[in-house]
Image: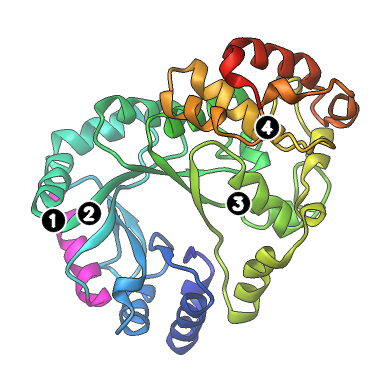
Amino acid sequence: MGVSAIGARPKSEIIATVRSAIARGANFFDLAGGHAAIFPAYGKALQGLREKVYLQVHFGADYTSGEYGWTTELKKIQAAVKWQLDNLQTDYIDFGFIHCLDEDKDLDAYQKNGVLDDVLELKRRGMIRHIGLSSHTPALVNRVLDMGIIDTVMFFINPVYDYGQGEFGIGGADDRQALYRRCEKEDVGISVTKPFCGGQLLDAAQSPFKATLAKPQCIQYTLDKSGVVTVLPGYGSQPAMEEVLAFFDTTPAERDYSAISAYAPQEALTKCVYCQPCPVGLEIGLINKYYDLTRLGDALAREHYLTLDKTASACVQCGHCNGRCPFHVDQMARMREIAQYFGKRGKP
């Protein structure tokens, strides 16, 4: 659950929605929003429930003025985090986030001002359980991944941004997909924010694609990306929360987002996005995914491939996938290539 929408609601409604979400099985809550009021409301909502949830707290988001602010100054960040923890009525942070760094100069300031050292020290002392990074920029995320200090990345994933549209569509389709694969290879989980692109994807009049996607399609799109472990839709009421969580009651057909191929730029075509069914039961998406990761040197992905019920060598070359693939990937050729790559050990 994200807080961008619920933060504007009365305290009693925030509390009721959070508790209802937990009762329905939601257990991962991000706390970067535009409203300071979420913190005392969450503190009340989580009484007796703190151990059942994971909280993302951002080092750089400052709510001490009553409104959201952004800073890389150490003393301001320390005061802001103390204020958040006091209002949340907790003494530890599940995921302490290096907050919203998009440019090299931001990271440089974060390091120069001693903020990064402070975050690392808090993890050493156990106040922070895991360190994360929130960013819109693949290149910046890769730079922090090179440091080997983070366990998770909060990233903005949806077809608008992945196809280079919108304010935060930073990096090409290849750059973004490569980042997702790197995160999975290095066991860095991705928590997704803005799966509906702020609602634009749900409204043809606002969408850059001039077409409407349903919430289950948007959620499935993000879940299918390499490295993704959780999705954080923002809902502003209990009915909206129920609508989002109804995803788990939808059919594969209702989650099918292959129609987005009509919006895809040329650079995104002929590249597998792991969405295709198979009449003989091959999990084509997983086969492609594990192959791509194995070629990057991920030994665990290789083992995952080899333990699939059916591997690429079971492909009967019927052509069903080629005729239906929305991105015009030659899956028949891919299955031959993958089967040859893994050799005899890749037999079903």
| Amino acid found under the numbered disc labelled 4 | Lys
Discs 3, 2 touching: Cβ within 8 Å: no
* Up/down of 323 relative to 115, above or below: above
Discs 2, 1 touching: Cβ within 8 Å: yes
Mark 2 vs 4, N-terminal side: 2
Give the foreground label among 3 and 1. Answer: 1
| Amino acid found under the numbered disc labelled 3 | Pro
Please say whether residue 205 is one of the residues in the magenta stretch: no
* Up/down of 201 relative to 52, above or below: above
Q: Pick whichever, 67 or 16, lies toward us.
A: 16
Mark 3 vs 4, N-terminal side: 3
Q: Pick whichever, 71 or 26, lies toward us.
A: 26
Q: CA distance from mark 1 to mark 4?
A: 43 Å
Mark 1 vs 4, N-terminal side: 1
Q: Which mark is residue 126?
A: 1
**Left or right: 58 in relation to 284:** left
| Residue 152 % position (x, y) | 36, 43
Q: Which mark is residue 310?
A: 4
Report which residue position mark 3 lands on.
Answer: 195
Q: CA distance from mark 2 to mark 1?
A: 6 Å
**Left or right: 230 in relation to 63:** right
Give the foreground label among 3 and 4. Answer: 4
| Amino acid found under the numbered disc labelled 1 | Gly
- SS at mark 3 in the image: loop
Mark 3 vs 2, N-terminal side: 2
* Up/down of 348 relative to 245, above or below: above
**Magenta stretch in the rendered image:** 74-89
